Amino acid sequence: MRSASSLLRRVLTALVMGIVGLTMLVWALERTSLVNFAALHDGAEAQIPMRVYVTMFIGLAIVNLCTFWAVSQWSAYLRAHPDAPQLPVWFLLVLIVLPGGALITSVATHAGYIRSLDAVPVDPNMGFIAFQVMMAALVIIALVLLGVRWSPGYKQPRNAQPRNPQPREER
């Protein structure tokens, strides 16, 4: 059986690696959109370097791997400790809706601001990237916690017998 400190270490590792992946992903998305806006503003065709797409793909892969790893670690912990306290569902839903709304609003506001500029910068603002990463991380964390809570059989080990086995009827 794994200890709580071991779980904490694994979940913090997944969180840190996930934030690194989210940063790579959001930076590449922002860089792509800024280059496209600048090209559109100048009437030229966008020339996005291949390294931006590679960064985006690697960041997406890291985020997905860390998310699935966190789901498996948390579900294994809950199967081993079925009485472990969990955050209420209403709180997790608020943790999805508020940061998700802030993220969508900030992207729309930022796009409007970029369109209003005479000269469009092609380097992303790291403060804006950090804000997007934190909001997306809050949404993903809440989704992991909800996903494990609502997945069938997360509290019951795979090899366990059903609590009330029903005898099979012979036909």
Image (cartoon, helix red, strand yellow):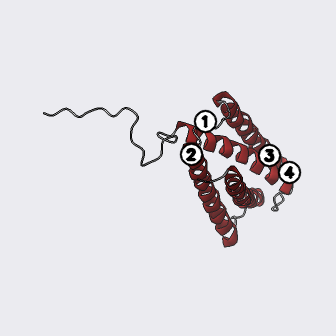
Which circle marks residue 117 in the picture? 4
Marks 2 and 1: in contact by CB < 8 Å? no
Marks 4 and 1: in contact by CB < 8 Å? no
> Dot 2: few (<14), some (14–19), or many (≥20) neighbours within 10 Å?
some
The x, y position of residue 46, in whole percent, is 70, 64
Residue located beneath label 1 in the image: 83
**Residue found farthest to the left:** 171
At 81% across and 52% down in the image, what residue appears? Answer: 130
At 63% across and 59% down in the image, what residue appears? Answer: 60
The x, y position of residue 171, in whole percent, is 13, 33
Q: Nearer the viewer, mark 2 or mark 3?
A: 2
Q: In terms of sequence position, does the residue under pointer 4 or pointer 3 come before the other?
A: 3
Residue located beneath label 3 in the image: 110
Label 2 amino acid? Ala
Q: In terms of sequence position, does the residue under pointer 2 or pointer 3 come before the other?
A: 2
Marks 3 and 2: in contact by CB < 8 Å? no
Q: Is residue 49 visible?
A: no
**Residue found farthest to the bottom:** 50
Residue located beneath label 2 in the image: 80
Which circle marks residue 10 in the picture? none
- Relative to 125, residue 96 above or below: above
Label 3 amino acid? His
Q: Nearer the viewer, mark 4 or mark 3?
A: 3
Q: Secondary structure at mark 3?
A: helix
Alpha-carbon span between mark 1 and mark 2: 9 Å
Q: Is residue 23 visible?
A: yes
Marks 4 and 2: in contact by CB < 8 Å? no
The x, y position of residue 76, in whole percent, is 56, 49
